C-alpha cells in the first residue's frame, strides 16, 4: 500500500508541476491569438477608414504629362501634393515620377534680394 501511495503522489506531483502549467499556457496562447486576430481585423478596418484617397497615381492611370499638368492646374495643386501621406511626406513613387521631376521649381521672393 505504501508503494501505491508513493506512486500516486509522484503522478499527482508530475500532473500538478507539468500538465497544469502547460494547460494554462496553452489556454493563454489560445486567447491571445484570438485577441491578436481581432486586433488585426480592427486595424485593417481603421486603415481603410483613414485612407482618404485610394485612387492610383495619375501616371499609373495612363494620363500623359500634359494631361496631368492640365488636371493639376484645374485643381490648383499638383498631383504629388494631393497624394501626400497622412504624415505630410511625399509618396516614394512621386519622388521618382517624371511629372514631379519635370515640375518647375517654385520661385520665392526675398526682401533682401530687391533691396
Image: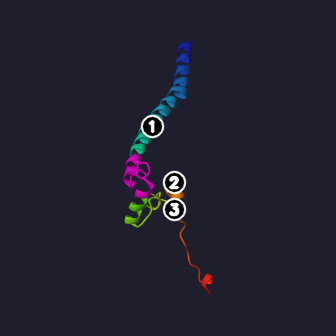
- Give the residues in magenta: 42-67
Residue under circle 1?
A: 33
Q: Could you say whether the residue bearing mark 1 is in a helix, strand or loop?
A: helix
Compare marks 3 and 1 and give the one earlier in the sequence.
1
Residue 68 placement (x, y as % from top left)? 42, 57
Q: Reply above or below: 32 against 51.
A: above
| Residue under the image location 47 percent in, 36 percent down | 28
Category of crowding for the residue at label 3, using alpha-carbon neighbours closer than 10 angstroms: few (below 14), some (14–19), many (at least 20): few
| Residue under the image location 43 percent in, 58 percent down | 66
Q: Reply above or below: 48 against 73.
A: above
* Location of residue 69 by image quarter: bottom left
Frontmost residue, 63 versus 48: 63
Compare marks 3 and 2 and give the one earlier in the sequence.
2
Q: Could you say whether the residue bearing mark 2 is in a helix, strand or loop?
A: helix
Judge from the rendering whether residue 21 lies leftward or rightward of residue 112; answer left or right.
left
Disc sitting over residue 103 in the figure: 3
Residue 5 placement (x, y as % from top left)? 53, 17
Residue 21 counted in the magenta span: no
Compare marks 1 and 2 and give the one earlier in the sequence.
1
Disc sitting over residue 98 in the figure: 2
CA gap, disc 3 and disc 2: 8 Å
Residue 22 placement (x, y as % from top left)? 51, 29
Q: Could you say whether the residue bearing mark 3 is in a helix, strand or loop?
A: loop
Q: Quadrant of the C terminus?
A: bottom right
Amino acid at each position: 500500500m505504501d508503494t501505491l501511495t508513493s506512486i500516486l503522489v509522484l503522478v499527482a506531483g508530475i500532473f500538478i508541476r507539468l500538465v497544469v502549467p502547460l494547460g494554462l499556457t496553452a489556454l493563454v496562447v489560445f486567447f491571445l491569438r484570438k485577441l491578436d486576430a481581432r486586433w488585426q481585423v480592427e486595424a485593417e478596418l481603421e486603415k481603410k477608414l483613414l485612407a482618404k484617397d485610394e485612387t492610383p497615381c495619375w501616371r499609373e492611370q495612363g494620363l500623359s504629362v500634359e494631361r496631368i499638368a492640365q488636371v493639376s492646374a484645374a485643381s490648383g495643386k499638383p498631383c504629388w501634393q494631393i497624394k501626400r501621406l497622412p504624415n505630410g511626406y511625399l509618396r516614394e513613387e512621386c519622388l521618382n515620377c517624371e511629372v514631379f521631376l519635370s515640375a518647375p521649381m517654385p520661385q520665392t521672393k526675398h526682401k533682401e534680394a530687391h533691396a
